Amino acid sequence: MVAATFDVLIIGGGVMGSSIAYHLVDEGFKGRIGIFEKDPAYEKASTALSVGGIRRQFSTEVNVRLSQYSLAFYQEFGERMEVGRERPEIGFKPRGYLFLGSERNWPILVKHQTFQKSLGVETQLLNIDETLQLIPDLNTEDLVGSSFSAGDGYMDPHGVLQGFVRKAKHLGVEYVYQEVVEILRKGDRLEGVKTKDGTTYLSSSIVNAAGPYAGEAGKMAGVEIPVVPVRRMVYLLKPPRLFDYDLPLTIDTSGVYFLHETGKQILSGKSRKEEPPGFNFTWDRDYFNEAIWPSLAHRIPLFDKLKINSGWAGLYEVNQWDSNGIIGEHPEVRGFYMAVGFSGHGFQQAPAVGKALSEKIRLGRYETVDVKPLGYERIVEGRKVLEEEVI
């Protein structure tokens, strides 16, 4: 059964797909837009399960530019997403990102700070005393200093998602809560999609914004996309004493990060390099006890007596090629657009990626942020975008 014809279909109704749809309509696109989301409650959506951070401390220009646009967007989010005089509350906390530096990684932080300042990001290199002014409880015996980007921070990712969805719907975007199981293609052109209930939706323009399911969506279109789902666990912790100051989002030299959650509780986690790909949403205490807690207790001795309140696991959409996003139209399949593979920084870059793909679809070119370095062509040509600050 053919349900309808659309000008653009988007697979994935999380923050990325919703941002693309919002930017298209907000910037004058008059066509009909449909978004497919198989998880209407967003219970397992990567957006809702993220910690909601945004930073500009990257080592490549394209990633810095994406985050610069996105930070400005999130600062104005309530105003932009207003519907009927109601503005979403995302609880943005501009407490900064703090990368701690030891003898080993200090030269890298210095190099990156110089590069970031050249692009207009006022990253500061702090000495030990200045670092302690931000976190007085810090153990600095093995540190040289830190790299701090004021104004960056974190927010409520679920609030952001709901704000995007509500605004997109208000602007006329149609959400279809069905799973796409087939992409209809004839030669190098697309014809539409088929959902699990057997319904066909026609369109010659399809956007793959399927997050950790992006590789599967690519296969439906006959395209190999090197993106796989990888579990990342987050732990909600109660310290024995609540700090009387606010933590920046802090990245320890061990790779462990920590930040404040509601009520001065602590959120913490760490990327697990040996984690196998898979749709795994379980979380375990053993990993925290073995790989995270020792680093937390070393860095802040007070954390030696932490209590685990709860935890959860979400999925990174890991680009196995170079851990950076794949953005733009596929070079061999006309009308097949991608916004996938962000490897942990998709939430923070979603506004800018939405802007970029909107321009590509409407105008055939990028105007605000040049994301051509992140095109699929680099995979075909064997080029990698090497980002040194992937968390």
Image: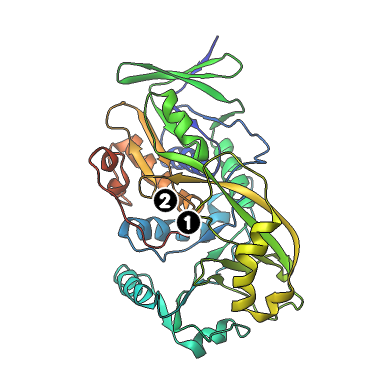
Horizontal relation, residue 282 to residue 25: left or right: right
Up/down of 280 relative to 11, above or below: below
Q: Residue at position x 43%, y 38% from top?
A: 24
Q: Residues within 10 Å of mark 1 (few under 14, many from 20)?
A: some
Using the numbered discs, state the Cα–Cα distance from disc 1 to disc 2 in whole angstroms. Answer: 8 Å
Look at the image and tell me in which quarter the N terminus lies.
Answer: top right
x, y percent for residue 249:
56, 69
Q: Earlier in the sequence, mark 1 or mark 2?
A: 1
Q: Tag 1, which secondary structure? A: helix
Q: Is residue 352 left or right of residue 111?
A: right
**123 or 112: nearer the eye?**
112
Mark 2 packing: few (<14 Cα in 10 Å), some, or many (20+)?
Answer: many
Q: Picture coordinates of residue 53 (x, y %)?
A: 54, 60
Relative depth, front residue between 370 and 197 = 197
* Quadrant of residue 286 within the rendered picture: bottom right
Residue at point 34%, 77% (across, down): 107
Locate residue 88, reporting x and y percent: 63, 52
In the rendered image, the residue lying farthest to the top is 1
Q: Nearer the viewer, mark 1 or mark 2?
A: 2
Which amino acid type corresponds to the residue marked 2 in the rendered image?
Answer: Ala
- Where is residue 127? Give x, y as percent: 45, 87
Q: Quarter of the image holding residue 339? A: top left
Q: Is residue 138 above or below residue 356?
A: below
Q: Is residue 218 visible?
A: yes
* Residue position for label 1: 73
Type of amino acid under label 1: Phe
Residue highlighted by disc 2: 352
Q: Is residue 48 visible?
A: no
The answer to which of 58 and 74 lies nearer the viewer is: 58
212, 187: nearer the viewer: 212
Q: Are circles 1 and 2 on residues that touch, CB within 8 Å? A: yes
